[in-house]
Image (cartoon, coloured by chain):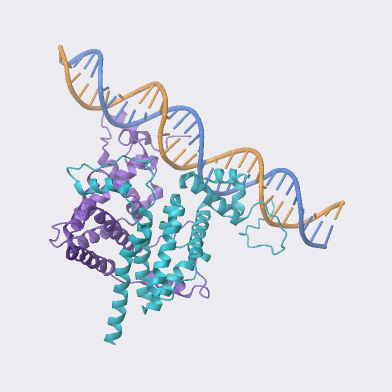
Chain colours: A cyan, B purple, C blue, D orange
DNA sequence: GCCAATTATCTTACATCGTAAGTCCAGAAG
DNA sequence: CTTCTGGACTTACGATGTAAGATAATTGGC
């Protein structure tokens, strides 16, 4: 038994020719491909390794646990959102709307990952780009840090919720077929009936929900300035 | 010693004829207790059965699958929201705010179940009460069904997001400790620092985000009426 | 009260999951 | 070359959801 070194790899050789068969990025890419193709539940360490032509345990040399892998995947999605955010508008309101659009685009591009994207708020690393951009926009609006935090949360929730609404429902493989009784819940039944054939622009829906909030923020800042 | 860590049923059988008297409602109640006490991940069929003095497979006579059980749990939470919604206000805006308050109260009462409550939208059965109430309020506001559906989604997302924000973060045992680099993401780092010591009223935050949306709905209805 | 039918529970078993521990090999360093 | 070492492989374990069937408790008919 030798002394165990046990250190999460930070090596990252800068020798430009190392042809590592497996890299963290490659694993994350393949994980996303698997999720897109077969759903979040299909992402097991063995299945993912199989796609990479490798055994399951090999993945643990790049991520300490499956949870860490999922965090990395979530971070990759955040980066994708940031990537869609090309030449951000100067006006902070338009900037926030553009951010929201990128978020929804990414959700719709990876419908099977919607839970990952909406449930994990702290992706770490480069995943903070979008959060920082959001806070920056709110800060530019004139809010102080605490208000930035609270409003950002409201905005992100709204955007994610609208995005999630527009991913095609998964035909609920789980649980029940819970169609509401039209006599007890007439409006709900009608809403569910429309639900499928709804042809509206997700970004328009987001914007209609978002603009009133942005206007309220503007008014809040103006009011505080006037009071001072 | 491979088995029989617990076997209460057998002793009961020996002692007499007292049976576990298992019912769907009781299972759901115990599931909620387990989630509240030990978290969502701790809810396994065996653990739940153990709490009920029963074997795991017995649960399958009341629910066809674990997913169905979770749906039933989610429905129970919806019913709890409805239960908090005593004497609803006349004004549709106040009614929506009251609904949102009940939702957040329920989320905060069951912090470990926040994912269940926010991710499952179709609880079925009596769980539709709150959705129906929300749609009814929007309908009273003067919106037509399609607009009701879209706006309800925005409102629910906002409310759930604000509620989820205020559940104490679980120090997420999984994944990474993703503190952002303050040089790259100064605002994010600051926000995370405030995050813990934030003392604000969740309901106030919700209301501040919600009222602008409700005002926008009112304006939308008024505009359409004027146009006609 | 007794027996058959029904219902709810238990037993056993299996495939799959995440992952701990240890083995093995190829390439870099001396 | 030899040695070191990092990454991939093998094996194994406990936990999970649940299918299939055995078994016990309850109920309804007489």
Along the viewing direction, whichever of A25 and A197 lies nearer the viewer: A197
In the displayed structure, would residue A139 be above or below residue B19? below
- Residue A207, percent across and down? 34, 64
Image quadrant occupied by the C terminus of chain A = bottom left
- Which residue is pictured at 25% across the width and 51% down the height? B78
- Which residue is pictured at 45% across the width and 34% down the height? B3
In the displayed structure, would residue A184 be above or below residue B165? above
- Which residue is pictured at 36% across the width and 66% down the height? A155
Q: Is B147 placed left or right of A72 in the picture?
A: left
Along the viewing direction, whichever of A46 and C22 lies nearer the viewer: A46
Residue A117 visible in this rendered orientation of the protein: yes
In the displayed structure, would residue B75 be above or below residue A149? above
What is the quadrant of residue B197 in the picture? bottom left
Q: Is B177 placed left or right of A169 in the picture?
A: right
Residue B164 visible in this rendered orientation of the protein: no
Along the viewing direction, whichever of B74 and A89 lies nearer the viewer: A89
Q: How many marks?
A: 0
- Residue B155, percent across and down? 28, 60
In the displayed structure, would residue B61 be above or below residue A61? above
- Residue A86, percent across and down? 49, 68
Residue, far front: B228
What is the quadrant of residue A92 in the picture? bottom left
Residue, far bottom: A228
- Residue A70, percent across and down? 50, 54
Q: Is B157 placed left or right of A5 in the picture?
A: left
């Amino acid at each position: 038994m030798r002394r165990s070194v046990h250190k999460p790899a930070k090596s990252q050789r800068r020798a430009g020719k190392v042809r590592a068969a497996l890299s963290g990025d490659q694993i994350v890419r393949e994980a996303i491909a698997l999720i897109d193709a077969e759903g979040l539940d299909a992402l097991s360490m063995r299945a993912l390794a199989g796609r990479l032509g490798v055994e399951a345990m090999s993945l643990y040399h790049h991520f300490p646990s499956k949870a860490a892998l999922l965090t990395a995947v979530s971070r990759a999605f955040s980066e994708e959102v940031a990537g869609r955010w090309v030449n951000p508008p100067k006006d902070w309101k338009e900037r926030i709307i553009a951010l929201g659009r990128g978020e929804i685009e990414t959700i719709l591009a990876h419908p099977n990952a919607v839970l990952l994207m909406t449930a994990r708020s702290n992706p770490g690393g480069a995943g903070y780009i979008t959060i920082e951009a959001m806070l920056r926009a709110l800060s530019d609006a004139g809010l102080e840090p605490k208000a930035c935090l609270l409003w950002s949360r409201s905005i992100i929730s709204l955007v994610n919720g609208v995005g999630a609404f527009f991913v095609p429902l998964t035909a609920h493989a789980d649980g029940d077929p819970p169609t509401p009784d039209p006599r007890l819940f007439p409006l709900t039944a009608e809403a569910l009936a429309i639900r499928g054939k709804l042809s509206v622009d997700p970004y328009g829906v987001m914007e209609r929900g978002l603009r009133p909030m942005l206007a309220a923020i503007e008014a809040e800042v103006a009011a505080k300035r006037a009071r001072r």
